[in-house]
Amino acid sequence: MYRALTYYAITNNLISKDFIDKEALINDLSNLEIDFRKVSSNDNLEVHLNGFPVESKIRSLKVSDLVSQLAAIDEVRTYMVKIQHSLGKNKGVVMDGRDIGTVVFPNAELKFFFRGFSRTKS
C-alpha cells in the first residue's frame, strides 16, 4: 500500500530523491483509492491504485528507494491505517508490515512475529 502511494507520488512529481511536496501529497490522499483485486487468471491478489493495476510498477528500485520517506509522514500513516482498518473489519485477512500487529491491529486474534536470522559458516 505504501508502495502504491509512493508510485503515485513519483508519477505525479510529488517526490524525488531530494524533494517531497508534502502539502500536495496530503491534499491528494482523499482522492486516492488503494485496494486489492483478484487476478482472474490465477486468483492472486494485486494492488490497484485508482482502479488500475500497479503491482508490477510498485516493485521498482525507484519506489523502494523512496517509500520510507512517505511512510514517515504522519498524515500518510493515518490515511493508510484507515484503509488497513477497513480491509480488516470483516476479519479473514492476512497482513504484514512493520506495525500491523502493534499499531494497526494491536488486538488481532493471531499474530506472527518473525525475527531476522543470520547465517553462520559450519
Image: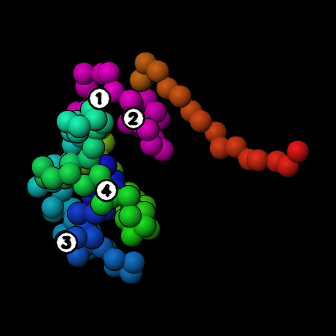
Q: Amino acid at mark 2?
A: Met
Q: Amino acid at mark 3?
A: Asn
Q: Amino acid at mark 4?
A: Ser
Give the distance between the C-alpha atoms of the residues marked 1 and 4, in whole angstroms. 24 Å
How crowded pointer 3 is (Cα within 10 Å; few <14, some 14-19, many 20+) is rated as few
How crowded pointer 1 is (Cα within 10 Å; few <14, some 14-19, many 20+) is rated as some
Nearest to viewer (mark 1 / mark 4)? 4
- Of callouts 4 and 3, which one flags the residue occurring earlier in the amino acid sequence? 3
Give the distance between the C-alpha atoms of the residues marked 4 and 3, in whole angstroms. 18 Å
Nearest to viewer (mark 2 / mark 1)? 2
- Of callouts 2 and 3, which one flags the residue occurring earlier in the amino acid sequence? 3
User: Which numbered circle lies on residue 12?
Assistant: 3
Q: Is residue 58 visible?
A: yes
> Residue placed at 15% from the left, 53% from the top?
52
Secondary structure under tag 1 reads helix
Q: Which residues are magenta?
A: 85-106
Secondary structure under tag 3 reads loop
Pick the residue in front: 109 or 116.
116
78 is higher (above) or lower (below) than 66 = above
Q: Give the percent coordinates (x, y) of residue 96.
A: 43, 38
Q: Which residue is mark 4?
A: 56
User: Which numbered circle lies on residue 88?
Assistant: 1
Task: Reply yes or no: does residue 87 show up in magenta.
Answer: yes
Q: Which residue is mark 2?
A: 95
In the rendered image, the residue lying farthest to the bottom is 18
**Quadrant of the image containing the C terminus:** top right
How crowded pointer 4 is (Cα within 10 Å; few <14, some 14-19, many 20+) is rated as few
